[in-house]
Image: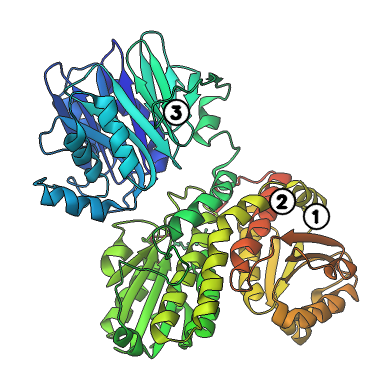
């Protein structure tokens, strides 16, 4: 995720660009930049680091100009650096572009452009767009941009400015947001409403495939073929704070709803079009590399550790490589048995968790190969690990991790299938079936989020109970752990997760009349077993909420309430099963009046031991 702004009008552009970017820093904050036309040429100022660094820079060397574009970056292609910051320019410096998204075919386009003599200055996917518009410009900016849009593949919100026609800004979007703010004799562009709300409340919300040409006095919206689109003005009624959360009450619920997109983006470019293989350009492992891995250790904290528990099932069952999972704070104090035939996978949303970083260093010291799964490009963990697989969830602001978890599961599944393919441990038809199923996940997650009313009702009904138990078997057990952590950390209800077969070895003593038990029953291989565990707790008068897959007609007979997730493969179900549990935790916290985004005693990133 990145943030984009643009201004054209009679006022100075820079103050709005900086003010707008500040409101968009939640979308990314590893570097920032602006480009302003000063009447003769375009001046680009950009800098790695927080926006305040750019702000100081432009204060010291202000550029007067009434048209400009800006960007705050959340690195995807290319580490955070001055060169990789946006805006990007072509060879002549006369065309500038800012981008939010991923240009999937950029390598191919870059090769073609280099062959034609274009010189690249950054490692980003975005820079190809600036060179393409230079290549296609023949005196008509709009036509050049249309041609660029017809060549690029992927997701984008793009804004273009050129010295050749400085009386206009052009923008377009596909799968990433872009809003146009309509002023009097001036117009604005932004990734999100908070950036423009102090200037105007009249907006056009661009739809996928639309392109807009902004001048001081007009906004023309058309499709990519140039056919005009009649846009309705969307009047914003939210206050500024609500606007930052996209109209949601909390970042947590906003991030829960961002999961379909985050899941899709994490798979983007990593699945063969014909479903036959997982592609990991960033790894490029050979069969020999994989044969040399005798054992995998997965190390992480909190939610990321729970993702690792799911990862153990994935890797062992699909790739048939033994896996140990450890909490990072324990790993380095237990003299772990790790050597050069061990692959250490560390998982961390922030990439800055100190325990995880220290465990990574210890694994390296012991000779292991290391791989990080993280959401933050250029983070300490990303820099320390030998190799990195990024989750493309975008910045996660709420302390309670949601979209980071589901994207970590997707990354682990991709990795397991990649290992399985290289080891020949998976039948090609089964691989195809799973990849096909993965491609359905974003749509299924979306479907789950369409009707949250029943979950809200359970949360209201049971929100004031003192204890909740989560039970499950196999992959459902791993998801139960995450469900219980979510509930504890934001609602402060005491919650425990158990492998359902373990209850009878002690915890069953705590199951008394009215205690809520959330029973996950999505795994067909152990379905009969979980049903008997449900009977055990029902016999002690627990209230059972069963989470099962659509098509399961039996579950309702055994439980008090049922939540059904879309039908999917057993390996894919954790990505969906966790969503109602996140919602349950969220609405329970709301019922209890808790501070959802900032739970007591916790911090988003734990950089102390
Ligand atoms: O940034 P990380 O993934 O390394 O963070 C690890 C944990 O601190 C984190 O998952 C924590 O458990 C969350 N608050 C859970 O929602």
Mark 3 lies on a secondary structure that is strand
Q: Which residue is mark 1?
A: 462
**Label 2 vs label 3: CA separation?**
34 Å
Q: Which residue is rendered at x = 30% and y = 62% of the image?
A: 380
Say above or below: 310 vs 127. Answer: below
Q: Please identify, in this view, whether the residue under mark 2 or under mark 3 is nearer the observer.
A: 3
- Quarter containing the N terminus: top left
N-terminal of the pair, mark 1 or mark 3, is 3
Secondary element type, mark 2? helix
- Seen in the picture, residue 217 relative to 81 is either above or below; the reply is above
For residue 179, which numbered disc appears in the image?
3
**Residue at 27%, 45% in the rendered image:** 126
Looking at the image, residue 22 sits to the left or right of residue 36; the answer is right
Name the residue tied to disc 2: 588
Looking at the image, is mark 2 or mark 3 earlier in the sequence?
3
**In the rendered image, which quarter is residue 225 located in?**
top left
Q: Label 1: how many residues lie within 10 Å, few (<14), some (14-19) or many (20+)?
A: some
Question: Residue 556 at what x, y percent from top left?
Answer: 86, 65
Q: Are marks 2 and 3 in contact (CB under 8 Å)?
A: no
Q: CA distance from mark 1 to mark 3?
A: 40 Å
**Quadrant of the snapshot with the C terminus:** bottom left
Residue 479 bears which disc, if any?
none
Instruction: Bin the neighbour count of mark 3 within 10 Å (Cα to Cα): few under 14, some 14-19, many 20 and up.
Output: many
**Residue 114 is at least partly visible in this image:** yes
Query: Badges 1 and 2: C-beta atoms under 8 Å apart?
Result: yes
Is label 1 in a helix, a strand or a loop?
Answer: helix
Residue 390 in the image: state x and y as whole percent.
Answer: 38, 61
Q: Residue at x 48, y 88 (%)?
A: 320
Estimate the x, y position of residue 471 in percent, counting from the top left: 72, 73
State how far apart marks 1 and 2 are (Cα).
8 Å
């Amino acid at each position: 995720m990145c943030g984009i702004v643009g201004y054209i009008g009679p006022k100075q552009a820079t103050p709005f660009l900086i003010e707008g970017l500040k409101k968009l820093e939640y979308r990314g904050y590893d570097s920032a930049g602006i480009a302003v036309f000063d009447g003769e040429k375009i001046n680009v100022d950009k800098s790695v680091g927080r926006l305040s660094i750019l702000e100081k820079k432009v204060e010291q060397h202000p550029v007067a100009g009434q048209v400009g574009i800006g960007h705050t970056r959340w690195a995807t292609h290319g580490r955070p650096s001055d060169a990789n910051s946006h805006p990007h320019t072509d060879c002549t410096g006369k065309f500038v572009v800012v981008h939010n998204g991923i240009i999937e075919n950029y390598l191919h386009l870059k090769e073609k452009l280099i062959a034609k003599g274009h010189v690249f200055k950054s490692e980003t996917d975005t820079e190809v767009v600036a060179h393409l518009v230079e290549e296609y410009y023949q005196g008509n900016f709009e036509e050049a941009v249309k041609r660029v849009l017809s060549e690029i593949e992927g997701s984008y919100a793009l804004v273009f400015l050129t010295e050749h026609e400085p009386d206009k800004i052009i923008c377009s979007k596909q799968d990433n947001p872009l809003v146009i703010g309509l002023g009097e004799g001036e117009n604005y562009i932004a990734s999100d409403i908070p950036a423009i709300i102090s200037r105007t409340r009249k907006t056009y919300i661009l739809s996928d495939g639309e392109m807009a040409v902004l001048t001081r006095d007009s906004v023309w919206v058309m499709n990519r073929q140039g056919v005009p689109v009649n846009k309705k003005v969307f009047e914003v009624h939210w206050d500024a704070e609500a606007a930052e959360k996209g109209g949601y009450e909390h970042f947590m619920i906003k991030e829960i709803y961002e999961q379909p997109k985050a899941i899709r983006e994490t798979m983007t470019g990593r699945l063969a079009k014909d479903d036959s293989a997982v592609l990991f350009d960033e790894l490029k492992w050979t069969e020999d590399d994989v044969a040399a891995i005798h054992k995998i250790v997965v190390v992480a904290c909190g939610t990321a550790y729970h993702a690792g528990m799911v990862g153990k099932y994935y890797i062992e069952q699909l790739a048939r490589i033994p896996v140990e999972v450890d909490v990072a704070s324990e790993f380095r104090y237990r003299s772990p048995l790790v050597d050069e035939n061990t692959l250490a996978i560390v998982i961390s949303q922030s990439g800055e968790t100190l325990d995880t970083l220290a465990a990574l260093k210890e694994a390296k010291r012991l000779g292991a190969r290391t791989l990080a799964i993280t959401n933050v490009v250029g983070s300490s963990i990303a820099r320390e690990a030998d190799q990195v697989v990024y989750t493309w969830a975008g910045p996660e602001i709420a302390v309670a991790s949601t979209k980071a978890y589901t994207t970590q599961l997707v990354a682990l599944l991709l990795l397991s299938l990649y290992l399985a393919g290289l080891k020949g441990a998976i039948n090609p038809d089964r691989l195809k079936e799973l990849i096909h199923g993965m491609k359905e996940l974003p749509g299924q997650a979306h479907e789950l989020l369409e009707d949250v009313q029943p979950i809200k009702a359970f949360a209201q009904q049971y929100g004031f109970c003192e204890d909740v138990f989560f039970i499950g078997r196999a992959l459902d057990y791993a998801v139960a752990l995450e469900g219980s952590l979510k509930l504890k950390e934001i609602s402060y209800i005491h919650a425990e997760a158990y492998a359902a077969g373990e209850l009878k070895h002690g915890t069953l003593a705590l199951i008394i009349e009215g205690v809520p038990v959330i029973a996950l029953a999505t795994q067909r291989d152990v379905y009969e077993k979980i049903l008997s565990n449900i009977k055990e707790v029902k016999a002690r008068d627990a209230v059972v909420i069963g989470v099962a897959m659509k098509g399961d007609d039996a579950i309702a007979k055994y439980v008090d309430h049922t939540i059904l997730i879309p039908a999917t493969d057993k390996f894919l179900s954790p990505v969906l099963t966790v969503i109602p549990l996140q919602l349950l935790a969220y609405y329970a916290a709301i019922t209890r009046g808790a501070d959802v985004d900032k739970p007591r005693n916790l911090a988003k990133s734990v950089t102390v031991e």
